[in-house]
Every structure is written in structure tokens, then in C-alpha cells.
Image: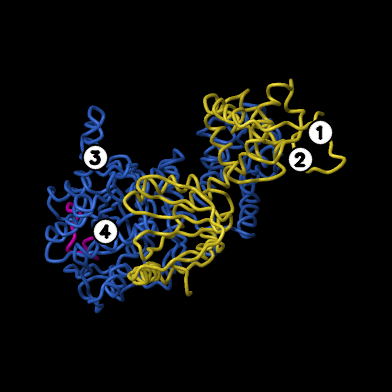
Chain colours: A blue, B yellow
Amino acid sequence: METLTKLQILSGAARYDASCASSGSKREGPACGTGNTSQSGICHSWSDDGRCISLLKILLSNDCRYDCAYCVNRSSNQIPRASFTAREVVDLTLEFYRRNYIEGLFLSSAVMQSPDHTMERMVRVAETLRNEERFGGYIHMKIIPGSSSELVRKAGLYADRISVNIELPSQASLQRLAPQKHKEAILEPMALIGREIQQSLVERRTSRLAPRFAPAGQSTQMIIGASPENDFQILRLSQGLYKKMNLKRVYYSAYVPVSEDNRLPVIASPPLLREHRLYQADWLLRFYGFSAEEILSDDEPNLDESFDPKTAWALRHPEFFPVEINRADYATLLRVPGIGVVSAKRIIAARRFSAISPEGMKKIGIVMKRAKYFIICSGRPFEQTLRQPALLRQQLLLGESSGSALPALPKQLVLPGIFS
Amino acid sequence: MNRYLYDGTADGLLSAIAWILEEESDPQQVALGERQDTLFEDGFFIGTDATQAEALFYRLRTQAPDAAHSLYYFMLAEKEGMESSLLHYISLAFIHGDKVNGHLTHPSVRDIVAVAKKAGRELHRMKGLLRFEKLRDGAYLAKMEPDHNIIHPLAWHFSRRLRAQDWFIYDARRRTAVRWHTGTLQFGTIEQFTAPALSDDEKMVQTLWQAFFKTIAIPDRKNPRLQKSNMPMKYWKYLTEKQGE
């Protein structure tokens, strides 16, 4: 089979993986080789779906033994199958890298004969790139659940980032939709990777020559909308992963209907709005000091579709507001809807010089569309509506609908009883 | 309010600022502009002194590294008519140190920081969007038309990254070019640009990349608006993946 055909099959099969980050690792390139990495990561292009392309994202093979209901590569699906040789992947990576198309390689694979057999072939690609070709660019490797810890360790030594996909947010759904995958086979390598990363960091404190283990950390991905878990369950799972396993990122991937299996929900289009809200909530967990229990509860287990999770929290907590811009600390500023990390830092930097006036807020570039209902500047309020939550709700909704930066996202079609 | 003039060069601008900071008690009340050579021009002309300009930059770098960083990026933007703002900004930087970049309620600080940010953003963007093509002799060539004069820092970036290959970057808007060869960077200008012949396998690799670009997008999530906002169309001219679309 021609390389072009293989590339089309194997990149098409890899596109449902959300991660494309190339950040978190800073490496000087080898003197006689090609490539380095930059701490902030670099996007090289944006595909027609608007997502950034920074890595050559491909599968080594889409010839899968497993039959996971949600997956386009499941063994029962009648699609063309292909596999790359290690050399083909290495050459593609280098040719693309030399022309500055990409930041590096994101290698994943379907499970061929066995997890170990597959993992071994993937590790060989990374090994060739690093040792023979002196490639210093970014490598993200997926771990095949069930592969031996020896291979996981090897992968971590060559790759900048490694990830194990959780796929479905609960054991029950995994059993139902991916009966050949087991929770332990997913969580064990995650824990192992977490320990190895920790240990390498400790060793590197005493010796600069100690090997680096996945310097950009580990991440994972869950499919949203293929199984019945609510947002609260998902968010609590993410929270646990960030706190206990030290993950860098959890990716959420709106389920794209790729199969007509009767175990799956029938949806007209992927639940993009829900995915978007989950990412917003995820950001609140990682950068805004929120806990999952503050964002959602057992009584209200799903994220509001009409408001972002921070605004929804603010509407439930009128006692927290108004926030005095010239006095509030960083953590408090971060809780104001419409004020993010950048704005909060700007406010703190600017008020060192003089108290910020309402006009000053606009000057330093704070977007007041939502924030104005929740703040006061040196005792002066911006809007009077704060005392009437119902009116405030309405005001905010009106503001949302006019010229929002986001394109109109299709809503998820909810079919009651589909999982009963 | 005293008004000063300089010759319009970068060195002239910085040495004039150095002179004013030395001589004037309140630089915030001073205006600085480029000499236009008209008959009734008002102001005192300050001559260019490259060592003064350099000394000012180094002094700023020790006292306020972030502000020196902003100054560097501001100069890449080649903006005209902002000389007074720059003077006020630098004088504040010597008073407040790096905290000055947070003084965004000050109009001069806001203007300078905004221009510097924009230049920095384009530099970062071009690190990703620059596309090299392999030439018949094995070297690589990239063309670009950026809004800001970013060829120096961009070349430095690629000198750390693509060390093992010879390459050129050509700025078609400014007719400047840089060459990486045997471990050194050489900058120059090109009066007449003629496109050299491409290597035999170049078209094949480009076809592979274009195919990858097409298939990696999820058809159910098509979003051209988001694509354009992340990757403005002004950059598409030299993007391999956007040729022949």
C-alpha cells in the first residue's frame, strides 16, 4: 500500500483523539540532530474543524482486535485497515518536521495481536527517532492498556508526554461498551507513570544527568455522551485524577456517532456544548481554585447549558458579591464571572499604582460584559441589578445572545430511556 | 512643553531618549518626534549616537528586564508616531522597574505594551506557520510577509531547532533574508528574488502533508470561522496546506 493511502487511513482513524498539546517540555536539541521543544508549545496549523495541529497525529495501525462500541476502529466495523512500519513513521515525522509543518509526533495505535506486541512496535518508533535520528522534537505516546510495565517505562524515557485513555467515565460503562478493556489495566499504568515522573523529578534535583521521564507529564481522555454518566461524576473523576494521579490534562471528547450499535445513544450531532462546558469547569478546577462539589451537586448533577459554570456558581451565591475591585485578593477576583487569570493579574498589577476607576477597568482591557454585574470600584457599582437574581439572569442571557465569540453550538439531543 | 526631534532611525530614537532622560527634569512633559525637514518645523534636533542608544538598552535590561523585552518587541513593530509614548514609557520603567508593565491605566504604557504584545504574538505565530520547501541543492527555503520585522528573533528560533540542515528565510515585504549555514546566521537584503528550483521529492512530501491536513479534521465538527480566527487568511499565501484549495 502507498504511504499516501496509509497516511489517509491512519490519520483519519486518529482524529478523534482530542489532545494535541506540545507544551510542558523544554529541551535543547542535540547538536548534530533535528528538533527541540519549547515550554509553551507551538501550534503549526488549524484544521477545518478549527482545532490546532501541532503534532503529526497518527495510529501505527488501525487493525484492532478489540470491539469497543464507540470506536471507529472496532474490529466489527467494515473499514479499510492499514499499518505503518516503524521506518515509515520515522521518515514522515522527519520530513514534516524539517519543513516546520509540525512540532513532533503523536503516536497511538489500535491493539494488534496483543497489547505488548503493539506497545513494543510503538516504542521502537520512538527509539529510532531519538537514538538513530537524534530527533529532539516533541513525542507524545499513547500507552496501550494491558502492556507490561517494562514497556511503559521505556516509552516514558523516550516521550515528552504519555497518556492512557480512560475512555469511559465508569467501570459499568466500560464493561458495557468496551468489554475487552478493564479498569485495572487503565489505572495501573497511570499510577506507575505518576510514580516514575515523581521519582525522575526527585533524582533530577540531585543530578542533572538523571534521565527525564515524560517531562511534559501525563494526560488522559474521556468520551462524553456515549454513556449515561452525569457531569458531576465526570468532574469528580477529573478532580481525583488531578489530585491523586498528578495528571497534567484531562481531555473531553464529544462522542461523534461512528457506529450504529444499539448500546449507544442515538444523537444527531456530537454534544459540543456539553464538551465546552466541561472544559470550562475543568479550567475552574485547575486554575481558579474551585472544587467539583462547588460547581455541581447530587441535586444538580449537570452543567447549565445557558451559563458558563462560573456564572452559574455566582448566581447561586449572591452573598459573595459584589466584589470590591480595589481590595479583593487574587483568589476572590478569580471568582468573578468574566474575570480570568489574565484580568485578575492585570487588576492587581494596575492598582499598585493607583485605585482603578470604572473607566480604568476598560483601559486595562477587562471585558465588562459579565463582570459589571458583580463588582464595585471604590464603592461605586457598575449596574444596579445585582439584588434581583431573576432580573440578573435575564440580563446575562440577553448579553450572551448578542455577538458571542463562540459559534452557535448544536445542543445534544437527549433521548430519555435510551439506557434503561 | 519642550519638543525634540531625531533622524527617524532606531538608533536615533534611543539615543534621543537617552539624551532627554539625562537632561530633562520631567521627561513626562517632553515630546519627541521624527524630523520631517519642513521649513517651519518646531523643535530641537538631537543627533544620533549609537553607543548612547546601546548603553540605554543595556541599562534598561539590568534595571527592568521585562521592560527591555517590551522595548525590543516594540522596535520590531516599526511603528511611527509613537516616539513620545516610548519616551514616557522608558522614563517610567527607570522609576518603577518591571512593575511598569502593569501600569496599564497610563496611556503611554498601555500603547507601548499593546504594540509590543502584538509583535510578540506574530513572532510566536510565525514560529508555527512558517513553511520550508526543500530546494534542489538540499537546502530549505521559507517565504513570509509578516506585519512586524521579526526575521531576527525568528531566525534565532530556527537556528536552535533546525540545526542539521541549511536553510533560508526570506521576508518578501521587506526584501530581507537570512541564511543558516555551517552553524552561523547571515542576514542581508535581496533586491531581485528569483524562486530556485525545488527538489524532486518536494511535491510528494507536500501532497502527504495536504492529505494529512484534510483527514485530521473531524467532518462533523467543521468550523471555518474558528479556523480563520486562529489562523488569519493573510498567512495562507505561503501555507503549504492551503495551496490549491
Q: Is residue A12 left or right of residue A184?
A: right
Q: Secondary structure at mark 4?
A: strand
Cα distance, mark 1 to mark 4?
64 Å
Residue type, mark 1 in image = Gly
Which disc is residue A212 wearing? 3
Q: Is residue A180 left or right of residue A223?
A: left
Chain at tag 1: B
Q: Which residue is mark 4?
A: A107
Cα distance, mark 1 to mark 3?
61 Å
Q: How many numbered circles are shown?
A: 4
Locate residue A358, reporting x and y percent. 70, 38
Q: Is residue B43 above or below residue A401?
A: above
Q: Alpha-carbon neighbours of circle 4 within 10 Å: few (<14), some, or many (≥20)?
A: many
Q: Secondary structure at mark 2?
A: loop
Locate residue A236, reporting x and y percent. 35, 47
Locate residue B112, reporting x and y percent. 64, 39
Chain at tag 2: B
Q: Do badges 1 and 4 share one subunit?
A: no
Q: Which residue is mark 2?
A: B35
Q: Quadrant of residue B85?
A: top right
Q: Quadrant of residue A53?
A: bottom left
Residue A359 lies within the magenta run: no
Residue type, mark 3 in image = Arg
Q: Secondary structure at mark 3?
A: loop
Viewer-side label of 4, 2: 2
Which disc is residue B43 wearing? 1
Q: Alpha-carbon neighbours of circle 2 within 10 Å: few (<14), some, or many (≥20)?
A: some
Residue type, mark 4 in image = Leu
